[in-house]
Image (cartoon, grey):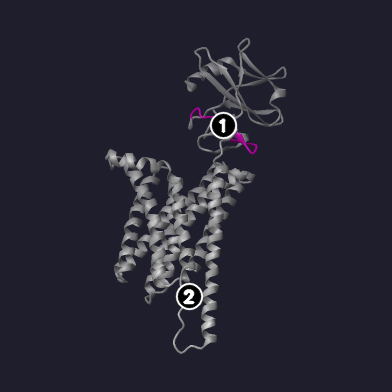
Amino acid sequence: MLQTFLKIFIPAMEEGLTLGVPLAILLVILNRLPAENFRKNFVKAIKCGFWISIFVIAVRVGTRNAVSREMFEMISTLAAFIGEIAILILLFKRKFNRAFSIAISVTALTLFLYHGMELWLLPVGAVTSAVGDFSTLNFWTKIGGFILGGFFSFLAAFLIFKAADALNDQRLKFVFAVQIGACMIQQLLFLIQVSLARGFITNMTLFELAAPIIDRKSWLIFVIFAAVLVVPITLFSQPKPNRPENSNPAEYRLILSRAIHKRRWGFGVILSLALMILSSTFGSYIANAKPEIVEAIPVEAVSGQIDVPLEKIQDGHLHRFVYRASEGEQVRFIVILKGGSNYGVGLDACDICGVTGYYERDNQVICKLCDVQMNKATIGTKGGCNPIPIEYSIAEGNLRVPQSELEKNARIFK
């Protein structure tokens, strides 16, 4: 269950953090500007991004091919990248005009469209893989991972918001530029990756330079973590407030006390950052650990039948067998007791994912390629990612599979 939980918790946390941190720091900047319309447009853009991302996911799930995830995210990322550049230029030039307002709205909207889509795909994937059975522990473990990952990223963004709010204007601009710069590195690599895959860019030199980085793109979250660390470091290195003119010692002590109190948000950021780094390193190691695959037991046909003693398959666990066909193909099939005397029997392959096969995790049968959990009740029936069903019978204390059935399907394992 821990592995299932972490597979949802970690991406939910990382996507939520990448979305929430730059928006939180930008909100601090907008709160210090006299014009109220900047904040209003910012909030409207976030609301629009929230609902549009949900709508796009609903359309994608309902129609399957109506929305290209890759192209949608590419367009959103490109718009966010341009908006972020505009914000940085106008912010440091202190040109808080209509163009600045548009750049804020575009960036907030498109960031939410990209990361929102990635976030919503996590629970949607859990729902679709549940095959209508929402009472399983596996399903609620995934939903719990999504909720806690989202909550943790929101809490981290809130702590960063409070820590950033304690900075003076110059230092606030600096940490915002660092954070946006880290996001832009991720975005630029994503744009290059999609452009190379789609053939928009054919420069082989660029491909050779980008390929090693793209292969390790999961490490880019540590660029975000490094940018987050700049917030408390900048806060702790900020000089203490100057004593205002005509203030008495008691008033100045109160100012210093408030400044010290605000520094505590920096410790909260460091603590949350440590937990996130631990999740993205040690947690990812656990989440991505290769499953232990049950060894396929060789079987042979006798009088046109393959017999598997029932006493060897009555424990409710997944069992794999392999038969050598007449032309040399290694035909694998799986057997699992579903309940009573009812068995799920099928090839160790499916029509969607091919011959990658299945393994057992937390007493559940999982597809090795797409990580979809099989409903045990449906194993032995055709459809979806289920194992390709094969005929069998129970006779003389054995589960009996016709040799002809395996020979017929041998082509699948070529």
Question: Residue 357 or 127: which is nearer the viewer?
Answer: 357
Report the residue at 72% width, 19% height from top.
397
Residue extent of the magenta highlight: 354-365
Q: Which mark is residue 358?
A: 1
In the image, residue 221 above or below residue 407: below
- Residue 20: tell me if it is visible: no
The image quadrant where one finds the N terminus is top right
Which dot, 2 or 1, sits closer to the camera?
A: 2
Q: Position of residue 232 (x, y in %)?
A: 49, 64
Q: Residue furthest top?
A: 303
Amino acid type assigned to the residue bearing label 2 in the image: Lys
Q: Residues within 10 Å of mark 1 (few under 14, many from 20)?
A: many
The amino acid type of the residue labelled 1 equals Tyr
Q: Secondary structure at mark 2?
A: loop
Return the disc, 2 or 1, that comes first in the chain's sequence: 2
Residue 161 location (% of width, % of height): 48, 66
Along the line of sight, the residue nearer the viewer: 407 or 312: 312
Task: Quickly name the residue at label 2.
Answer: 240
Residue found 51% across the figure and 45% down from its top: 125
Q: Residues within 10 Å of mark 2 (few under 14, many from 20)?
A: few
Real-space Cα distance between discs 2 and 1?
61 Å
Q: Is residue 3 visible?
A: yes
Residue 362 sits inside the magenta stretch = yes
Q: Are marks 2 and 1 in contact (CB under 8 Å)?
A: no
